[in-house]
Amino acid sequence: MQMGKASLIPVNPFDPRARPDPYPVYQYMRTVEPVHRSPLGFWVLTRYQDCVEVLEDKRWSHDAGSILEPGRKAADPIDPTVRVLRSSIAFSDPPDHARHRRRLEPAVRSRMKNLDATTGRAADGLIKLLREKDSSADLIRDYAAPLALVVVTDLLGVPPADRPKIQRWVRELAAGLDPAAGPSNIARASGGAVAMVEYFLNRLDAAPNGTSGIVQDLAARRGKLTSWELVADLTALVVIGVESASGLIGNGMLALLRHKDQMEQLRSGHAELERALEELIRFDGPIHLTARVAQEDVQVGKTNIAAGEQAIVLLGAANRDPARFSDPDRLDLNRKENPHLGFGAGTHACFAAPLARLVAGTAIKTLLSAPIEFQLMGDPVWTNTVTVRGLNSLPVTLGR
């Protein structure tokens, strides 16, 4: 047990200076102290085996209150973000989790049947705008972010006029989910949560004539899920769907632009898109961590973690563990064995992963098929979050 001694880690995985390349930090932690007691009060796990065991062990809870407000007393008010998230599929433990899945997954699957064609049309429209630019563009501002927003909000049935405010609330909520989020980010996330709840409640109340998409489908299936739970699920779906799809497109394109040989393999058909996408998720996926709370005393590796303590599972570190992946820091779009944890594992594997994969796969394929030669121009700019790893800006030159 390592709690009694001073930490061996002189670096912080949540330090903004690690945003451009957190992997050396992860490697150091995994090598020196793979089960690390953070000064912030939780444990941080970086080995693949430890991470997958915690994710698949039912002794670990994903309850939002325990994770996001571990120090809250019974008489304290509940933060709006926590109140929403703990009522959603994203932060519910069994048996409630299964109850959410039974209502949400059929609606999502039904609406995703033609999503590749919808995504392709939206991508073609954005590429047409890219081709009209002189010589440079930003692949996040001009492609990944608007594409993810359009496709996911259309899937839900959000009117186009409402997309800008949805985008703002999504960013506010995502920024408040980091373990090291400051007071300002938490306050903005709370405001975004309240606004999103009010918005989706109004959309559900307008059913059936005033709604469409998944909102309409869920409104028709009220019963075992309350209106509050439906709103919580819609909020989680739009936040995770937009952020993970946009992040996967942006991170994936950056990896390909930095590895032109791999990009050419994908473009020429020498790398299969589905396998390539899984490697891009492993190499630098959009979800870098998740959290669990021990419901009883648990041993992780040689460390005892007490009931009630929280562990941060660093998915990004697990996906570069040389004990599980051969040459893990190399991008290999033809990697054959790839059991990555890019979208988690176990009961709480990311429910929006199929949506993110479909949108990002179609988006990257369409972009690489365009008659444009992309080159990196300057340094990319990362968002100031770790939970959702993504880019604010990916500047490129446009060759014809």
Image (cartoon, rainbow, N blue to C red):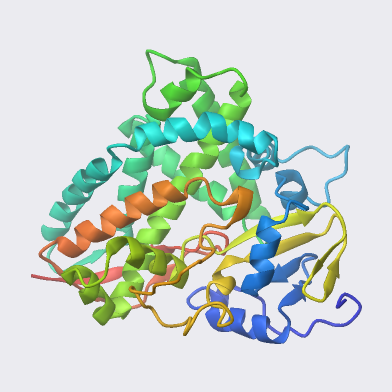
Residue 52, above or below 227: below
- Residue 392, percent from left and from top: 41, 62
Quarter holding residue 35: bottom right
Outermost residue on the right side: it is: 4
Q: Nearer the viewer, residue 297 or 134?
A: 297
User: Residue at (46%, 31%) from the top-left corner?
Assistant: 106
Residue 324, above or below 359: below
- Residue 49, percent from left and from top: 65, 71
Residue 2, above or below 51: below
Count of number-bearing discs: 0
Q: Quadrant of the N terminus?
A: bottom right
User: Residue at (58%, 73%) from the top-left corner?
Assistant: 317
* Residue 123 appears in the figure: yes
User: Residue at (30%, 73%) from the top-left corner?
Assistant: 256
In the figure, is residue 170 to the left or right of 126? right
- Residue 45, percent from left and from top: 69, 70
- Residue 196, percent from left and from top: 53, 34
Outermost residue on the left side: it is: 400
* Residue 393 appears in the figure: no
In the figure, is residue 342 to the left or right of 89? left
Outermost residue on the front side: it is: 336
In the figure, is residue 395 to the left or right of 87? left
Q: Nearer the viewer, residue 340 or 209?
A: 340
Q: Nearer the viewer, residue 196 or 361?
A: 361
In the figure, is residue 150 to the left or right of 50? left
User: Residue at (25%, 80%) from the top-left corner?
Assistant: 260
Q: Nearer the viewer, residue 85 or 61?
A: 61
Residue 316, above or below 56: below
Q: In which quarter of the image is the C terminus?
A: bottom left
